[in-house]
Amino acid sequence: MVSTESSSASSPVKIAVTGAAGNIAYSLLWRLAAGEAYGTDRPVELTLLEIPGAVRTAEGVAMELEDSAFDLLTKVTVTDNPDVAFDGANAAFLVGAKPRGKGEERSDLLAGNGKIFGPQGKSINDNAADDIRVLVVGNPANTNAMIAANSAPDVPRDRFNALMRLDHNRAESMLAKKLDILSSDIEQLTVWGNHSATQFPDLSYAAAHGKKLIDQVDNAWYTEEFIPRVAKRGAEIIEVRGKSSAASAASAAVDHMRDWVQGTAGLWTTVARPSEGEYGVPEGLVFGYPVVGENGTWKVVEGLEISDFQRERMDANIAELQEEREAVSHLL
Ligand code: NAD
Ligand code: LMR
């Protein structure tokens, strides 16, 4: 890491986005340029990383960003060199990776996508600013984040997150619709584990206006409809839209980074981050946890009572992530 921590409110925040010619980036970059992650008083410098064959397209994206005349956007750089992309970066959104198609699981992408994240982790290690925050979006996001973190020994491990805010948002939205309330009414919801079909959207603690919500839905809806539908929503989008989610993923990525930087005022959200052993998850696995954002870091909500029903689902996620770790042991 280089000593270019950007803490002054007026100096531009340097944000690197990989996969800049892709679908998610086409939504994400506009939200970042509008100041939605670091605040609307903070200038933004964007660096767009692509593979050589897609640099020309990324240049077109940069032209469109320019044409949008954002007051906050001070500079856009397009490159195929990770060392240039991550040079002095305060934030990195690692989106660049292949999406799955119909009938595939996200873990089917591991062999092809996993190898992207070691070199990018190393480049972040060598070039990014001291306060770098890395959000891995490319699938399978949890294990890719673990690979990147492992390749960056000088960067604190907790700076590598994987995106599970999309799962959290899906769960919140589905529950709000069921109960005819607003998503923003819902507190203390979380999605444990892996960004995969095994994930566990957990309503055990969810509440609205001080009332527990699990008592307001029937158990069959919770276990047979809600949990599997949230967990398989990515596949449902691919089935219906013909392509994997993009704008909702970008929106969730912005939510994640905004809350990481600006905090959650005591409210829970879901973040996949390297385990420090909380709730029996082996250290280093990147696991979805309930967290609050405070002073620029995440604090895992600790001390929750875990029932057998919850434990079983959390353990299935641990087993799956251990299998993924085994499959990429040559990259660690
Ligand atoms: P896309 O195919 O539209 O774009 C991916 C882009 O990444 C392409 O332009 C490609 O050239 C680029 N790329 C590939 N390797 C790269 C590298 N080494 N460096 C830089 N760029 C590289 O895909 P998309 O729809 O934008 O999705 C991107 C990834 O995000 C996929 O893996 C998808 O499964 C994943 N995703 C994750 C979530 C989540 O919640 N975690 C949600 C949606 C999508
Ligand atoms: C999603 O959850 O929408 C993404 O991870 C894309 C996918 O493959 O499901």
Image: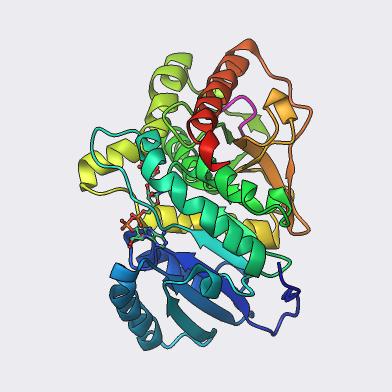
Over which residues does the magenta segment extend?
A: 203-207
Residue 20 on the magenta span = no
Residue 209, picture quadrant:
top right
Tell whether 298 sits left or right of 225.
right
Image side of residue 229 versus residue 176, left or right? left
Quarter assignment of residue 304: top right
Q: Position of residue 231 (x, y in %)?
A: 42, 31
Q: Residue at x 34, y 80 (%)?
A: 59
Q: What percent of the width, then of the height, locates residue 262?
A: 69, 62
Way the structure is coloured: rainbow
Residue 194 pos. (x, y %):
52, 33
User: Does the image show residue 255?
Assistant: no
> Which residue is most to the top?
308
Task: Give the residue at x 38% y 23%.
Answer: 225
Q: Relative to the observer, which residue lies in front, 159 or 298?
A: 159
Splitting the image into four quadrants, where does ligand 1 fall? bottom left
Quadrant of image for the C terminus? top right
Q: Residue at x 78, y 58 (%)?
A: 295
* Residue pictured at 72% horizontal, 80% vertical: 9
Residue 279's place in the image compared with 292, above or below, is above
Q: Is residue 96 above or below residue 298?
A: below
Q: Nearer the viewer, residue 323 or 103?
A: 323
Provide the major secondary structure of the magenta segment. loop
Residue 77 pos. (x, y %): 46, 81
